[in-house]
Amino acid sequence: MRKQVSLAFAPDGTLAKHIAGFNARDAQLEMALAVADVIETPGALVVEAGTGTGKTYAYLVPALLSNKKVILSTGTKNLQEQLYFRDLPKVAKALASPLQLALLKGRSNYLCLFRLEQHYHHVPMPDEQLIQDLSLIKKWSAETQTGDIGELSYIAEDSKALPYVTSTTDNCLGKDCPVYEDCHLLKARKKAQAADVVVVNHHLFFADLALKDTGFGELLPQMDVVIFDEAHQLPDIASDYFGDNVSSRLLLDICRDIDLACKSELRDHPQLAKTADKLALLIKDWRLQFSSEPSRGNWREAYQQASMQTAVNRVSEAIDMLYLVVKSSLGRSELVDNAFERLALAKIRLIKLLDMQQSGVSLWFETTRLQVSLHLTPLSIADKFRDIVAAEQRSWIFTSATLSVNNGFGHYTAQMGLNTAQTLLLESPFNYAEQALLCVPRYLSEPHEQTMTGQLLQIAVRLIEANNGRCFFLFTSHRMLQLVAKQLPDLVRQPVLVQGSTGKRLLLEQFVTLDNAVLLGTGSFWEGVDVRGDTLSCVIIDKLPFASPDEPLLQARSEDCAMRGEDPFAQVQLPQAVITLKQGVGRLIRDVTDRGVMVICDNRLVTKPYGEVFLTSLPPMRRTRSLDEAVAFLLQNKRDN
């Protein structure tokens, strides 16, 4: 296959002939050949391919030429759609590949016809927007071929209607559903099972591995090749799925379904409705034990409070009571039968989450304004994942622009249990020394000092004025984002767009269309965002992205690391922060003609010994401590354009 791959990437090869503007790069061919080798001789390959390498084509070409069954797993739904609707068809057409392609998303992305009918006729609450959205979804349900919620572009991403018209593993009736044969999810899965190349996302892949879903399980065993793009996200996603959780939302959904059944099929059973109502009330009382503000914390610590134990024990007793009452009504209503199964599962999970003596796991809670969820997360997935990789003769490829720390893969391979994997580190083909300038301004306060907000604003105003906007301002916390968002619009004349004011996709469209905007963002804007050209030529980062030390999972991993006699900072916190920073820095230069300034407002890059680990891991940009020099670079860049 190496010969076929080399011919495809040749200057006058298949890709150049059929894909407009395609130019092969040496690093791209090197990666493609390494992928081809591991597909031919099953094993595992870990590749960091710097921005601009062209890693998507580098794994797609050998995957399609192999004529084997392939799963492509991506980090986000956006990337999944980009791969399926844009990149994959282009390469398949160029190679004249006969392989059947399919896109498979998680179940919450598909319309559930049964739940739509249920809630369309019994609107859950008197809410005008909810009623309007349900009507629009009802109309669309008659037109859609796929039932993919992504088609509903005219409904808000967080519409209250969506949970009522999609199913979860818990409330799906499966083969007992009256519209089972017309199920959109079932059709998507059947198509995926018949396909040669299936595009999924990491959440769906691990949901299947953890056996928390059905149907997709028959797909993985047939596959010869598994390719993970954006593979740096895997350790955290896998940890979630190999763990367990129970939420007030899940329990309230069960109560709601029982209430619905009592109003329609079981009107002669008032005790059932009363018992469900009592559980719902006790769940709301339990939520009041936590701070009213959304938060995350250590569940072992929170459970030490006597009032917390009382509240959660009352919920547990009410679940036991409801379980007995529902059990006596089995066989009279599909809705109640299904609620019973979910309740039995929640009962088992809650027992597990109230066992404070278990080791090797982090027990933590998360609250939103109205809900609370408890989580059990394993501190290490290395052994489990190593067994999965070793179980079958299969090829595994892990790739991302950010996997290495200090030019080594030890951190990643240890996390994932990939000790015997081959590794390949490919530098970006961009000329960073010419194209970009890294500035760490002088005279900065320490990140925790109160004067920092004022300094950040002063720095941002100078850069935004010099560059006429066209800037991303990335934050490590929502708190700092909000502080800056309150003041910045009054200090600059350019439009300021703030994450959370509207959906991510719409915000990015506005940023590109305006051409002189400043976008303030946290987490989700640090990665998976591709803005090329002059529209984005300055990125400001408020500080090094160390996770909060009281983040429950990080806390537990650090304690575990210390017990093994290792340094938690060097082994856990630093590598995680380096990979996150590399993602943020990766937003700046996205093409060979891009030019821009990266400003990191954190003295520790220069004053602390570990600063060198960050700098070694970043692209080789020219460096300066002078903000004047950064402003001059931007002004020169503007004149050149």
Image (cartoon, rainbow, N blue to C red):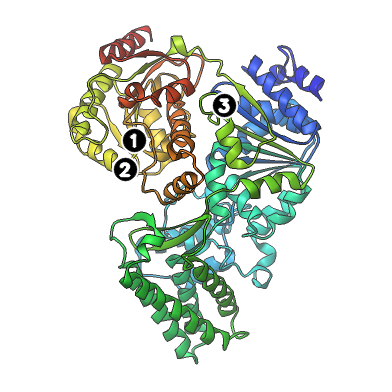
Please name the residue shown 75% across and 48% down the image. Answer: 391
Q: Which of marks 3 and 2 is in front?
A: 3
Q: Can residue 17 be seen in this view?
A: yes
Residue where numbered disc 1 is placed? 475
Q: Mark 1 belongs to which amino acid? A: Phe
Q: Mark 3 belongs to which amino acid? A: Gly
Tell whether 18 sits left or right of 239.
right
Quick one: label 1, few (<14), some, or many (20+) residues within 10 Å? many
Q: Is residue 414 above or below residue 149?
A: above
Identify the secondary structure beneath mark 2: helix
Q: Looking at the rendering, which quadrant does residue 475 occupy?
A: top left
Identify the secondary structure beneath mark 1: loop
| Disc marking residue 478 | 2
CA separation in Å, label 3 and label 1? 27 Å
| Between 627 and 218, the one nearer to me in the picture | 627
Closer to the chain start, of discs 3 and 1, is 3
| Between 560 and 135, the one nearer to me in the picture | 560
Percent position (x, y) of residue 79?
A: 56, 37
Please name the residue shown 59% across and 74% down the image. Answer: 341
Quick one: label 2, few (<14), some, or many (20+) residues within 10 Å? few
Quick one: label 3, few (<14), some, or many (20+) residues within 10 Å? some
Q: Is residue 225 above or below residue 148?
A: above
Q: Mark 2 belongs to which amino acid? A: His
Please name the residue shown 35% across and 25% down the image. Answer: 608
Q: Is residue 104 visible?
A: no
Q: Report if the CB atoms under discs 2 and 1 are less than 8 Å apart.
A: yes
| Disc marking residue 408 | 3
| Between 109 and 472, the one nearer to me in the picture | 472
Percent position (x, y) of residue 640?
A: 37, 7
